[in-house]
Image (cartoon, rainbow, N blue to C red):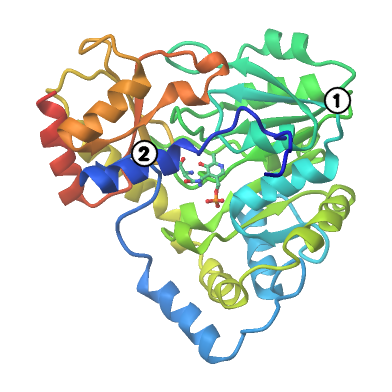
């Protein structure tokens, strides 16, 4: 028996694996882990197949295939009027998860503080803790999951190295407004704090809202890594493809780690996605596409006992079960999976001290057939 002290003593198996496994075992409809159950665009599949046939089967350049980095730069310019140099300021990663871990690894030293907003996506805190950093959580407030910017000011210290924001926000389905971003910009202006802006749902935003990318705010962009996920954008989470952008000086440090934790990522996928991304129509249609799914789902459960505020972005809808039971959300989510055959994600696992507000997250990136079956179940609860 080898004795060791865990670097992550409080980390168990991620809730996404726990709930997806339970859903499979119980043969339940799986609206827990966030992934679509409809296929990627056949045009994209063909572009990847073509890359395979054309033998893009050896290592890609370390920061990513040129065609893809150029397409990302064009997209950033087109959507946010912000120029990123594809040669020095863009790196293709194995999903946003690797980008996030690599950013933390490149900058966070033992005792450094990292501010995160809870409920927070579950890969942030362990990445910080694995590097000896200290997580400083700030709880989002009320049903709107709004940020208390005075609290943010009060939590910043001389040890704050990094702040992680996420808009559209997983798990709540809320978005940061322009006013929020301007407030953040003024708070960070005279500091050396690096911003990690996790924008994996940038194209999944509803009701005519504009995504407030950190790229739109010069004082944020100058200190920001922006992370993105092709899995979320193009319905292929299993490909584990993403990227990040940042000013050259920050990206130089990122690359020092990236080249040794992965070197480069899947080459044929990069070529296929690079060609596909050149056509803005492929991402401009996404808000309407997902809004239709959100509206279909919410209409189908309108007579249920759950209550909600419609999701503003992401492909998640949070439902409150205040009217139904007092059970812990973790218990209720498991019971619904076992007894009612529908799986969701309890929000408390993303909160500081596992605070339970009786909320479950449902993924509506599903076919209408699946959403209809899910609604039939939810309406009976
Ligand atoms: N950040 C957030 C907020 C997420 O929901 C996810 C899951 N897609 C990720 C990062 C990780 O993305 P990827 O699957 O590309 O690693
Ligand atoms: N981002 C996905 C979600 O929020 C899960 C990704 C994962 O399983 N790691 O459900």
Q: Is residue 300 visible?
A: no
Mark 2 = which residue?
Answer: 19
Mark 1 = which residue?
Answer: 111
Q: Is residue 23 visible?
A: yes
Q: Residue at x 35, y 20 (%)?
A: 329
Q: Is residue 111 left or right of residue 136?
A: right
The percent coordinates of residue 70 (x first, y second) are 69, 68
What whole-number distance in Å separates the C-alpha atoms at marks 1 and 2? Answer: 33 Å
Q: Is residue 71 left or right of residue 375?
A: right
Crowd rating for badge 1 (residues with CA inside 10 Å; few <14, some 14–19, many 20+): some
Label 1 near ligand 1 (CB < 8 Å): no
The quadrant of the image that shows the N terminus is top right
User: Height in image: 162 above or below 139?
Assistant: below
User: Height in image: 37 above or below 358?
Assistant: below
Label 2 near ligand 2 (CB < 8 Å): no
Q: Determine contact: label 1, label 2, CB under 8 Å.
A: no
Label placed on residue 253: none
The percent coordinates of residue 48 (x first, y second) are 49, 78
The percent coordinates of residue 152 (x first, y second) are 71, 14
The percent coordinates of residue 82 (x first, y second) are 72, 50
Quadrant hosting residue 20: top left
Quadrant hosting residue 374: top left
Q: Is residue 379 left or right of residue 270?
A: left
18 vs 263, nearest the viewer? 18
141 vs 348, nearest the viewer? 348
Q: Residue at x 89, y 29 (%)?
A: 192
The quadrant of the image that shows the C terminus is top left
Q: Secondary structure at mark 2?
A: helix
Crowd rating for badge 2 (residues with CA inside 10 Å; few <14, some 14–19, many 20+): many
Q: Secondary structure at mark 1?
A: loop
Identify the residue at the far bottom of this view: 54
């Amino acid at each position: 028996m080898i004795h060791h002290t865990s670097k992550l003593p409080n980390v168990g198996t991620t809730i996404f694996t726990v709930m997806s496994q339970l859903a499979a075992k119980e043969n339940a409809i799986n609206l827990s882990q966030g992934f679509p159950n409809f296929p990627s665009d056949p045009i994209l599949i063909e572009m990847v197949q073509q890359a395979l046939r054309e033998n893009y089967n050896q290592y890609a350049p370390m920061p990513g295939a040129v065609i893809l980095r150029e397409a990302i730069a064009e997209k950033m310019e087109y959507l946010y009027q912000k120029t990123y140099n594809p040669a020095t300021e863009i790196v293709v990663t194995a999903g946003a998860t690797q980008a996030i871990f690599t950013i933390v690894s490149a900058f966070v030293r033992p005792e450094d503080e990292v501010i995160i907003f809870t409920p927070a996506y579950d890969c942030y805190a362990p990445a910080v803790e694995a590097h000896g950093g200290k997580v400083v959580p700030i709880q989002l407030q009320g049903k709107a999951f709004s940020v208390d910017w005075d609290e943010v000011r009060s939590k910043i210290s001389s040890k704050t190295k990094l702040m992680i924001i996420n808009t559209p926000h997983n798990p709540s389905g809320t978005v940061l407004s322009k006013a929020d971003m301007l407030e953040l910009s003024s708070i960070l202006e005279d500091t050396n704090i690096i911003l990690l802006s996790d924008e994996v749902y940038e194209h999944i935003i509803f009701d005519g809202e504009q995504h407030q990318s950190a790229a739109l705010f010069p004082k944020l962009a100058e200190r920001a890594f922006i992370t993105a996920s092709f899995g979320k954008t193009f319905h292929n989470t299993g490909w584990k493809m993403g990227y990040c952008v940042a000013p050259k000086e920050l990206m130089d440090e990122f690359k020092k780690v990236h080249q040794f934790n992965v070197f480069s990522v899947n080459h044929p996928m990069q070529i296929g996605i690079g060609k596909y991304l050149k056509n803005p129509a492929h991402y401009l249609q996404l808000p309407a596409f997902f809004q239709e799914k959100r509206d279909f789902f919410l209409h189908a459960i309108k007579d249920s006992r759950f209550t909600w505020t419609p999701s503003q972005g992401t492909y998640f809808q949070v439902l409150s079960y205040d009217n139904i039971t007092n059970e812990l959300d973790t218990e209720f989510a498991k019971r619904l999976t076992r007894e009612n055959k529908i799986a969701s994600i309890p929000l408390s696992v993303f909160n500081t001290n596992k605070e339970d507000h009786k909320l479950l997250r449902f993924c509506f990136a599903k076919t209408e057939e699946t959403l209809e079956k899910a609604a039939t179940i939810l309406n009976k609860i």
